[in-house]
Amino acid sequence: MDLNVNSSERNKDRACEHCAAFFIARRSDQRFCSDRCRLHHWRLQKSATNAAAEERSSIASHTQTIRKILLGLMDASPRTVVAGQLRAAFAELAKLDQAILRLQRQNDVPETSDLAADAPPEDRGTPC
């Protein structure tokens, strides 16, 4: 076995990067078996890059649209939006406080089922 194999002999038998067919390389940097495979591979790569670029541009346009919508809602002043949200939160809190007070008042009133029909309220619950 000859260990001093020439580098040109090592690189002659290669697989095409497009069709995976084995071929004998005429140059040390040859990657494809034919011009047809090379061009087809190049076209595929080109269309993949174009698709990625189109996707990036569509995402950017969506981002711009969202930004315009948000700025339109915010009237270009975040302080006004925050103040409005605080007013709405405090109004909701006031409604909840009123509901809690109403429920507490309802629980403080004795139920009519606890009262005896003829007995005054202070005599209820005392055994005879």
Image (cartoon, rainbow, N blue to C red):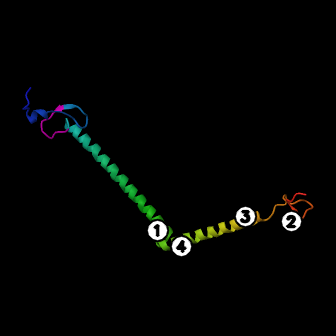
What span is in magenta? Answer: 23-31
In the image, which disc is placed on residue 122? 2
**Residue 88 pos. (x, y %):** 59, 69
| Left or right of 104, for residue 41 | left
In the image, which disc is placed on residue 83? 4
Q: Residue at x 27, y 44 (%)?
A: 43
Camera-near label (3 vs 1) is: 3
Three-letter code, disc 2: Glu
**Quadrant assignment for the N terminus:** top left
Residue lying furthest right: 118
Q: Residue at x 23, y 31 (%)?
A: 21
**Residue 115 pos. (x, y %):** 86, 60
How far apart marks 3 and 1 lie (CA) works out to 42 Å
Local packing at callout 4 (Cα closer than 10 Å; few below 14, some 14-19, many 20+) is few
| Left or right of 45, for residue 58 | right
Camera-near label (3 vs 2) is: 2
Prevailing secondary structure class for the magenta stretch in the rendered image: loop
| Left or right of 47, for residue 96 | right
Please, what secondary structure does the residue beneath circle 2 have?
A: helix
Local packing at callout 2 (Cα closer than 10 Å; few below 14, some 14-19, many 20+) is few
Q: Quadrant of residue 56?
A: bottom left
- 3 or 1: tag closer to the N-terminus: 1
Pointer 3 residue: 103
Three-letter code, disc 4: Ala
- 4 or 1: tag closer to the N-terminus: 1
